[in-house]
Image (spheres, helix red, strand yellow):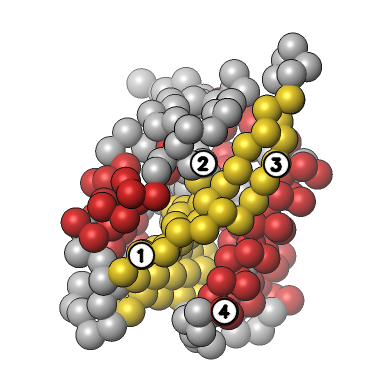
Amino acid sequence: MVSEPTAFDKAAAQWDDERRTARAQRLAKQILQYLKETETALPQASLLEFGCGTGLISFALAPAAQQFYGYDISQPMLERYAAKAKVFTPLFPGQNFKAVTQLDDVPGVDLIVICQVLHHIENARELIETLKGKLNPGGQLLVVDFPAGADFYHSTTDTEIHHEGFTRQQWENWCLEAGFASTDWRIIYQGTKTDPEGKEHKYELFLGVARAQSGENR
């Protein structure tokens, strides 16, 4: 039986609008700045974006790695990622972008990025543990999402909201319990959304980072 298209499937063709593109550029800039400040950028790094959508974040993070993997459960989103990869890869020799439909198709990577996706995952803590197993020794998991307690607003097109944000303590506990060596957290973005009634909702996004042990075997 063919499943019904999700809200994200239906939105794929119009996903790369001006607002989302500008936000992705700003978020990617903050992530790149963090890697530079902490001196954790690797010149030949590999990067997995979990819940990559059309690749707005992945392609904006081009300076951060050489090998990119984009994973998403929405086939229409992933098709747009793959189409961009065909155009983008030849323009940057030495870099490669690959859309994947199974996490098993992704080897060990140095960086995993999850941008505004974790609140859609029911078993978020379990996912953190799973993704840790994909990291090379010394690798980093970087999550961008909403802090708890904020004016949490999502448009009606969004699906399966399982968490109305996360606390710093929650992030640290989950990551340390999963076996990460250390964590970090900082607010990196402030924005505004307008609901159908015209009311504005101010919101923030945090960058949560978890680092694997340098000499650890996956």
Give the mark nearest the N terminus, 2 or 1. Answer: 2
Amino acid on which disc 2 is placed: Phe
Is disc 4 surrounded by few (<14), some (14 to 19) or many (20+) residues within 10 Å?
few
Give the mark nearest the N terminus, 1 or 4. Answer: 4
Q: Secondary structure at mark 2?
A: loop
Give the mark nearest the N terminus, 4 or 2. Answer: 4
Residue 143 locus on image (x, y percent): 46, 55
Amino acid on which disc 1 is placed: Thr
Question: At x 62% / y 23%, what residue is drawn?
Answer: 155
Q: Are marks 3 and 2 in contact (CB under 8 Å)?
A: no
Residue pointed to by mark 2: 146
Residue 79 locus on image (x, y percent): 58, 48
* In the foreground, 47 or 118: 118
* In the foreground, 124 or 218: 124
Residue pointed to by mark 4: 37
C-alpha distance separating marks 2 and 1: 17 Å
Amino acid on which disc 3 is placed: Gly
Residue 191 is marked as 3
Give the mark nearest the N terminus, 3 or 1. Answer: 1
* Above or below, comparing residue 20 to residue 14 in the picture: below
Is disc 1 surrounded by few (<14), some (14 to 19) or many (20+) residues within 10 Å?
some
Q: Locate residue 132 relative to residue 118 in the image: left or right.
A: left
Residue 77 locus on image (x, y percent): 57, 43
Q: Secondary structure at mark 3?
A: strand
